[in-house]
Amino acid sequence: MLRGLLDSGLIARNADGEFEERVPIHTLAVPDALRSLLLGRLDQLGPDERFLVDLAAIQGYRFDPRLIASACDSPPVAALRAFAAIERREGIVRSDDDGHRFDHRLLHEVVYEDLAPELRAEYHTRIAEARSRSAGPVPDGDVAHFLARHHLAGRRPLAARPVVQPDLDYLKGQCRFLDAAELASHALAHPGLLEG
């Protein structure tokens, strides 16, 4: 792998003989051989398990099985049991003291990118709607950010209208200016989401 990065010019040795990036490594696509290997692990899942894993990928590298259950109108215990079985059998997901996560960030990325765009948008909408059911009447902070992100990526982006401004305020208050600019850019693509 290192030889491949050197040969492609993505990394090089500096004057001290240390490796340095020529292109930010985090921007590179997952190599096809690795993608195939990871997708092979997913092929071992049944359709219902794959549905849960796909929804989890929409939420993120770390995910909440109870929210995933709500998004697919299932009881939480059913999702918890399914994720436990997937963890034992395939090791695709893990549970730890902080909740649930994918076994590796690349695995999360491959699952997310393997979804067809329309299906990905539908799942973002399901996740946003499930989270909206447990949100207060005027979401703010992390909840506003979560809802804005998923509604804007979903099939009904205008549903983000009530949370875009609270999310922008939250992000600016957290000094997350790049995130705020990205959110504003996505919102501006949909007339009526931002005012002023």
Image (cartoon, rainbow, N blue to C red):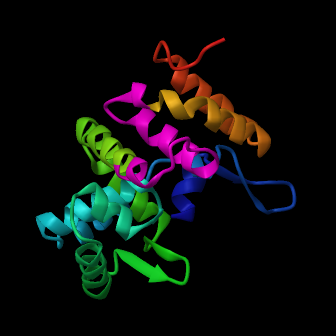
| Span colored in magenta | 130-159
Residue 38, given in percent of the width and then of the height, sits at 32, 66
163 inside magenta stretch: no
Q: Nearer the viewer, residue 100 or 143?
A: 143
Q: Magenta-highlighted stretch: main secondary structure?
A: helix
| In the displayed structure image, the side of residue 90 where residue 195 appears, left or right | right
Q: Nearer the viewer, residue 105 or 122?
A: 122
Residue 74, given in percent of the width and then of the height, sits at 21, 65
Q: Residue at x 44, y 32 (%)?
A: 152
Q: Quadrant of residue 70?
A: bottom left
Q: Residue at x 40, y 64 (%)?
A: 107
Above or below for 126 versus 164: below
Above or below for 168 versus 21: above
Q: Is residue 35 visible?
A: no
Residue 86, given in percent of the width and then of the height, sits at 27, 79
Above or below for 188 versus 120: above
Callout count: 0
Residue 173, given in percent of the width and then of the height, sits at 78, 41
| In the displayed structure image, the side of residue 54 where residue 147 appears, left or right | right
Q: Nearer the viewer, residue 57 or 156?
A: 156
Q: Is residue 83 visible?
A: yes
143 inside magenta stretch: yes
Q: Quadrant of residue 144?
A: top right
Above or below for 168 versus 57: above
